[in-house]
Image (tube, coloured by chain):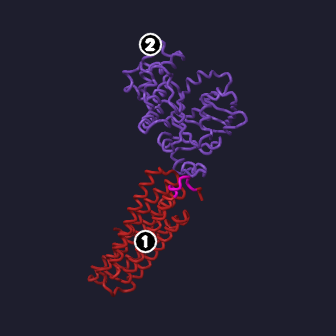
Chain colours: A purple, B red
């Protein structure tokens, strides 16, 4: 049995009067990939934003219920959100490198988190992060070029390298391949396979095929409710819930 | 019933696949029945027609293969659609094999003498009727997505085994009375065995239907009747 890394219990999220999540109970296993699927606006991104408290930046957002990482209450008011985000990295739909060099994109995080005090330590972190994100060979001779000069797929791997440079425990990916071509997507998926040996990964995706390829567990959300969660193979071959079946087979309507 | 697919052409393609399989099933039924009749009545005139109908069944098989390839490439089917697609592939293979066995039985009619005794053919006829009924039931279970009926067919193959044994025994008895019967008796033994094999393909189809409906394979081993050692 895998160890549970993140545990949510009766998690509710409100944006003002509008409730976005309803009593979500979902366990994410350590060093596994969990895929979250569901139609737009179903709450899957809202859910992952609870894991690194990204919802804090939205004034009208209110979170009730429990969400824990290794038994630590993520919603604790006294929790240092910066150190939480050091432990929980995030990669977004559109690659968003800083307007800085490739090197600085990676070294920025470790610097502000007080990791890599000397230049050689930072060099090592940059190299390791780029190697882990399978980008090193492509950029090692142009580290001082702007991150934005890279192709879309490379930029996304740069963002993954940036996320892992601070040595997080969890990586959240919100539709990380939706802006990428099939080859760049394949590279990210290959990378996810590699990264799951070290990190707990949650990926929000609209591609059923991608969810099947990369994840071990899948959760289906609809209108803010977690409708069904289970082993990916089971969900895509023989789901228990009719709504899940209708969604993944393209019958939703 | 499920809602329809958002993409209409996907819905049509799946329906077209199901329709093709049902047509192939119905052709296979006719061919099996014709081949049985030909053996029982020693009707040498129908041999060519039966052999020809096997070509039709084979054509259906390749048509279904193409439809399945297209569905997999275009739609990447999931859940019930995936099971429907994969099951169609498996069922069409079993139907094609049943067709081959019927063709083989039709060919066995040629060397048979016209004056075969009734007691020799009676058991073979009963076996043929049972296999026919099994094929009919399993195709019904496919059309109606009826798990219980498919499971019933699967369990009833035991009776096919038993009748095969009895039919074989009567041929062997007949053979042992006069060595001159050896030539055509061998053909009757093969024809009997072919029916038993067709029965096995029918149980494969029954297993596939069970998987299609519930997404799980039948557990445990199928009940087996008496078997003549090969």
Chain letter for mark 2: A
User: Dot 2 corresponds to which residue?
Assistant: A119
Whether residue A125 is visible, yes or no, is no
Question: Which of the 4 image quarters holds residue A22?
Answer: top right
Residue at x-position 57% and y-position 34%: A4
Q: Secondary structure at mark 2?
A: helix
Q: Which residues are magenta?
A: B4-11
Distance between the Cα atoms at labels 2 and 1? 78 Å
The number of numbered badges drawn on the structure is: 2
What residue does disc 1 label? Answer: B27
Chain containing the residue with disc 1: B
Left or right: where A224 falls relative to B182: right
Image quadrant for the C terminus of chain B? bottom left
- Image quadrant in which the N terminus of chain B is located: bottom right
Location of residue B4 in the rendering, given as x and y in whole percent from the top left corner: 57, 56
Question: Which residue is farthest bottom?
Answer: B115
**Residue sitting at x 63%, y 42%:** A226
The circle drawn on residue B56 is none
Q: Residues within 10 Å of mark 1 (few under 14, many from 20)?
A: some
Q: Is residue A192 visible?
A: yes
Magenta stretch containing residue A96, yes or no?
Answer: no
Number of other residues with Cα within 10 Å of mark 2, as a class: few under 14, some 14 to 19, many 20 or more: few
- Residue at the top extreme? A118
Badge 1 marks a residue whose secondary structure is: helix
- Pinpoint residue B58: horizontal percent, then vertical percent: 37, 66
State the residue in front, A125 or B208.
Answer: A125
**Residue B129, placed above or below residue A214:** below
């Amino acid at each position: 049995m895998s160890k549970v890394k993140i545990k949510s219990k009766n998690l509710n999220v409100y944006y003002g009067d509008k409730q976005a999540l309803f009593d979500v109970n979902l366990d994410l296993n350590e060093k596994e990939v969990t895929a979250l699927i569901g139609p737009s606006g179903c709450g899957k991104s809202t859910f992952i934003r609870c894991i690194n408290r990204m919802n804090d930046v939205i004034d009208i957002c209110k979170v009730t219920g429990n969400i824990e990482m290794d038994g630590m209450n993520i919603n604790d008011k006294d929790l240092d959100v910066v150190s939480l985000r050091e432990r929980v990295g995030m990669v977004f739909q559109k690659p968003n490198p800083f307007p800085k060099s490739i090197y600085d994109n990676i070294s920025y995080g470790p610097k502000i988190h007080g990791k890599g005090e000397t230049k050689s330590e930072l060099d090592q972190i940059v190299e390791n992060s780029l190697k882990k994100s399978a980008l090193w060979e492509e950029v090692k001779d142009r580290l001082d070029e702007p991150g934005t000069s890279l192709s879309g797929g490379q930029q996304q791997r740069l963002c993954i390298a940036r996320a892992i440079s601070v040595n997080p425990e969890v990586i959240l990916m919100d539709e990380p391949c939706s802006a990428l071509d099939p080859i760049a997507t394949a590279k990210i998926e290959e990378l996810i396979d590699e990264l799951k040996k070290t990190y707990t990964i949650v990926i929000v995706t609209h591609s059923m095929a991608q969810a099947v390829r990369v994840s071990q567990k899948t959760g289906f959300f609809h209108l803010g409710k977690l409708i069904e969660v289970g082993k990916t193979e089971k969900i895509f071959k023989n789901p228990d819930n009719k709504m899940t079946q209708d969604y993944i087979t393209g019958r939703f309507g | 019933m499920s809602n329809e697919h958002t993409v209409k052409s996907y819905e049509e393609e799946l329906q077209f696949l199901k329709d093709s399989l049902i047509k192939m099933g119905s052709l296979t039924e006719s061919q099996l029945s014709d081949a049985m009749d030909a053996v029982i009545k020693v009707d040498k005139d129908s041999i060519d027609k039966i052999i020809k109908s096997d070509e039709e069944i084979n054509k259906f098989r390749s048509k279904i293969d193409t439809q399945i390839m297209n569905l997999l490439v275009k739609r990447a089917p999931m859940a019930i659609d995936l099971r429907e697609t994969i099951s169609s592939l498996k069922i069409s293979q079993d139907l094609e094999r049943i067709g081959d066995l019927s063709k083989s039985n039709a060919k066995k009619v040629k060397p048979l003498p016209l004056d075969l005794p009734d007691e020799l053919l009676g058991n073979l006829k009963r076996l043929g009727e049972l296999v026919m009924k099994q094929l009919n039931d399993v195709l019904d279970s496919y059309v109606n997505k009826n798990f219980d009926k498919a499971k019933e067919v699967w369990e009833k193959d035991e009776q096919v085994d038993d009748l095969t044994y009895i039919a074989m025994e009567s041929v062997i008895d007949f053979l042992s009375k006069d060595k001159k019967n050896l030539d055509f008796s061998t053909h009757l033994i093969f024809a009997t065995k072919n029916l038993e094999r067709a029965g096995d393909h029918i149980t494969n189809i029954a297993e596939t239907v069970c998987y299609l409906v519930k997404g799980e394979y039948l557990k445990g081993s199928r009940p087996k009747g008496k078997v003549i050692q090969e």
